[in-house]
Image: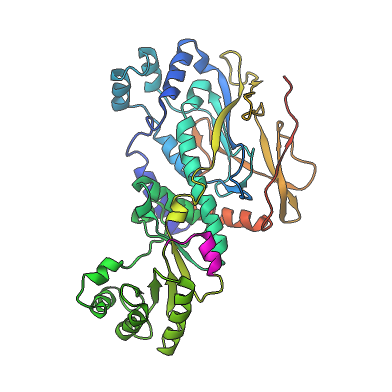
Amino acid sequence: MTPADKASSARTASTASTSSTALHTDHYELTMLDAAVNDHTADRRATFEVFTRHLPSGANYGVFCGLGRLLDALERFRFGPDELDWLEHAHVVSTATLDWLAGYRFSGDIDAYREGELYGAGSPVLTVDGSFGEAVLLETLILSTFNHDSAVAAAGSRIVAAAGGRPLIEMGSRRTDPDAAVAAARAAYVVGFASTSNLEAGRRYGIPTAGTAAHAFTLAYPTEREAFAAQVAALGPETTLLVDTYDTREGIGNAVAVAGADLGAIRIDSGDLAGEARRARAQLDELGATNTRVIVTGDLDERSLEALAEAPVDGYGVGTAVVMGGDRPTAGFVYKLVAVADEAGDPGTSLRPVAKRSPGKEGVAGRKWAWRLLDGTTGAGEEVAVDPNPPAGPSRPLQVPVVRAGAIVDRPSIEQIRAHHSAARAEWPVGRALEVTLRGHYDG
């Protein structure tokens, strides 16, 4: 682990005990628990799985993201005096269940796809095994985390691909809820964004932060040149100057006049971005600022980045299109019971496979295992099975132990997660849809 990773882990750990996540849940989780505690169903062993029934239209795969955030939240899933007092006064659960909640600590097992992994429809990205009472309480926390972060990651991964290797700054904090903005910055970094404008994401996760000035800064000075001079005096000539407040061509001239040929970058935020970038590059070269980069921002998404592929752009700033998950704001994950013991007892008690039969929402009973099928070093598909035996051909397992007996046993750094996503995406053929095949099933 690098010093930066260690610092990031320390910062994350320092925030882990700041507040309880126990009430970040739906009312019905607690009423289900109340009934289950009353008749001891809460003590029966059970297995839940997280999966999506279908990917959004046009998507070749999803990107599993949010596992690190879930583990942080799981450590803070505790019912302290404040939470218990509120539940009592709101008459949500009985006294017996309040006593049960006072001692709540998840003591089961969790297996999951590695964060940053690709998945398809039906992929069992997370498996929770424990008592019914312990596991049922986690549904909303799990789904709210993964549905948000995986949607952002999928949108971000498409944007990274469209950028064609040019660096991206995530700058969507002003377009979403403050807490969601931090989570979105993390997800964007996992899938390949170079930096974020969000300082809390930088503090909490060690993500590089970037940003210089908005149009308001230029407007606050009597002239554009005076604004640029103030910025350069504070940040040095390697800064990025926003040149389109008044007239872009004049702005570029003022920027180079103030900062000199060693100006780090200019930013263009409006107009015909491809045309403006070409004109800017030509003007900068004429002025001798041949190493000054051209950064483009302004409601960019994967389609506009594809249109800019041939333009002389050195980097992009993307906001709304990534933090809102593009036009697919949820990953569509569900949390379903797939196996349960018929009576409370030893953890080794065999489980009965169960599944919904509702039209359009039919499930597959029983705990599943999953593998990435390989053709050499290239991904060829995904196999999911109701037994732990691997496929006959070349493959790699997709699930890893994450929690054992309530203790977190695998917690990679954000840089390791980022590297895994890069490898998983490089392994998968460009343009191929990730198809999931099921091997075996339970009758009845």
| Residue 52 found in image quarter | top right
Residue 149 visible? The answer is yes
Q: Residue furthest right?
A: 392
Does residue 182 lie above or below 197 as drawn? above
Q: Position of residue 26 (x, y in %)?
A: 42, 28
Is 105 a magenta residue? Answer: no
Q: Nearer the viewer, residue 21 or 281?
A: 281
| Magenta region, main secondary structure | helix
For this orientation, the residue located farthest to the top is 39
Residue displayed at 47% across by 30% down: 138
Image point (34%, 84%), residue name:
253
Q: Which residues are magenta?
A: 299-308
Camera-side residue of 124 and 256: 256
Measured as percent of width and height from the top left, residue 424 is found at 62, 53
For image coordinates 64% across by 22% down, the residue present is 354
- Residue 320 spot, x, y in % from top left: 43, 55
Q: Is residue 314 visible?
A: no
